Image (cartoon, rainbow, N blue to C red):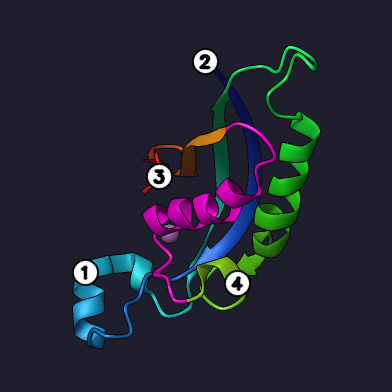
Amino acid sequence: MMFISRRVRFSASHRLNNSELSAEENRTLFGACNNPHGHGHDYEVEVVVRGSPDPRTGMFLNLRQLKEILAIHVVAPADRRSLDHEVPFMRGRISTTENLAVAIWDEVAPRLPGGTLHLVRVRESENNVVEYTGP
Ligand code: NI
């Protein structure tokens, strides 16, 4: 069993808000992250894929393909965007780092040409990191 990981970065804005709660409940729950005009993060995403190398190729996943999947399906839709208003894979999800990790898992896992998605790690800031190992 081996693990391959790849890291990508994108910048996006968001606002934590649950439309099913009142304005006051949202302020209490999310604090400054509920500020109406939002704020931005430089997100760092790492995906880890596990597998065993195919003896014929010496690989279980072509890194070029993983790079393309992340560029096309994660970075391009999210970079310089509002997670709440412009990013299709975040539609209907509160833009917490937890939900972002789940959404990225859902984008990447079914597209992998080899190996099995093992971990999605999303770093929202230097000190805040969420790791998701799947449903
Ligand atoms: Ni934030």
Which of the two labelled residues, at mark 2 and mark 1, occupies the earlier sequence position?
Answer: 2
Give the labeled residue for mark 4: 88
List the residue tagged with mark 3: 134
The range drawn in magenta is: 92-115
At which x and y percent is residue 55? 73, 12
Q: Earlier in the sequence, mark 4 or mark 2?
A: 2
Task: Examine the structure image and report whether residue 101 is included in the region drawn in magenta.
Answer: yes
- How many marks overall? 4
- For image coordinates 39% across by 60% down, the residue present is 96
Q: Is residue 102 above or below residue 129?
A: below
Quote the CA–CA distance across marks 2 and 3: 18 Å
Q: Using residue 50 as the reference point, say whether residue 61 is left or right of it.
A: right
Q: Amino acid at mark 3?
A: Gly
Q: Are marks 2 and 3 in contact (CB under 8 Å)?
A: no
- Please give the residue where the numbered disc 2 appears in the rendered image: 1
Q: CA distance from mark 4 to mark 2?
A: 34 Å
Q: Residue 79, position in %: x, y?
A: 68, 59
| In-image side of 132 versus 75 (left or right) | left
Q: Residue at x 49, y 40 (%)?
A: 120
Which quadrant of the view contains residue 88? bottom right
State yes or no: residue 9 in magenta. no
Q: Amino acid at mark 1?
A: Leu
- Tell me the residue that label 1 is attached to: 29
The label nearer to you, 1 versus 4, is 4
